[in-house]
Image (spheres, helix red, strand yellow):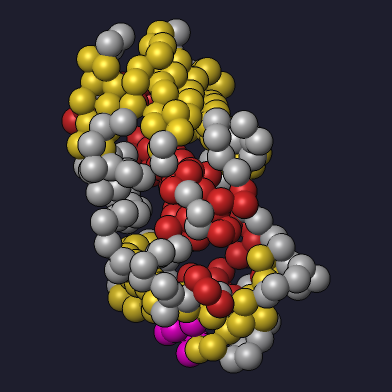
Amino acid sequence: MRIVVRLAAPVETVWRALTDPTELRAWFAEHAEVDLPHRYEFWGRYTPEGDAPHQRLLHAGDHTLRFAWSLDGVEATSELSLAAETPETTLLTLTQSHFRMAEMFDGSSIRGVLQTWWSLSLANLNAHLEGREPLPRTDFTSAELRGELLIAAPVDKVWQSLIDSEQASAWFGYPIGIEPWVGGRYAMGGLDAPGAAKIVDLEPERKLGVDWGPMGVGTWELDGSDGKTRLTFVQSGFDEGNPPYPGWAGILAGLSELRRYHEVADWQPIWVEEAIPADA
């Protein structure tokens, strides 16, 4: 798997955010300890299998971090490398071994969360660098999937960006076909794609509910005040013995761009290259 993002800070600032334990705890992990070039560890409730640190540092230098990470009994390898794009922007490339798309969908291994978990983590890194509140992080110790996001835009504009196919496809970074009525389709990949979800609740400028099948029902509630919108999002009705963490992390990562879509002048997504799965 490979993800490339454009970050709104110089290389040295991004490197510090990646390697300073205090900064890591702000946007990445509940617990983090770093002693380069010997130790790079993170754990806690926001980390897959975060009961203890399971990382082994392999390389640190030249603005590159590489570590082995034991997940579900397999030692995978993660690498983050930085390159200056301009004096004020940095390209970060994340490569991750031992990710299989099938495990994302069938829930057979915690490694199935890696693509969306890394996407959310990198979105929160950019939020941290831009001085914004981080998105809610996935709590792997809880089956309660709930979060809030304050967006500096009127509720009518936020609502339109949630139910208009063109706008939703833009900020989410993936084609989304939406039939904005109860019983209408909400189709990742577009309306011609198979397996569309169904809209089960719709109150204009107030609430949108989407039934994702085994992943449960996602409900987004909007509350506007003083030209801003508070968006509350909840996932419910899934198998609590196997919560849909991959899908939840993906939704959260997408919402980071929804906020930027409304708040950043001349908005462009941070994603330079979409995640490419690997077979290894």
Question: Is 135 situated above or below 190?
Answer: above
Image x and y of residue 138, in percent: 34, 54
Residue at 40 percent across and 29 percent down: it is 69
Task: Identify the image quadrant of the C terminus.
Answer: top right
Which residue appears farthest toward the front when viewing the image? 73
Residue at 66 percent across and 65 percent down: it is 188
Q: Quadrant of residue 273?
A: top right
Question: Is 229 situated above or below 125?
Answer: below
- Residue bounds of the magenta highlight: 202-209
Residue at 42 percent across and 79 percent down: it is 237
Q: Quadrant of residue 152?
A: bottom left
Question: Is 144 situated above or below 206?
Answer: above
Q: Is 3 within the magenta?
A: no
Q: Is 207 within the magenta?
A: yes
Residue at 56 percent across and 69 percent down: it is 161
In-image side of 164 versus 33 (left or right): right
Nearest the eye: 138 or 155: 138
- The main secondary structure of the magenta stretch is strand
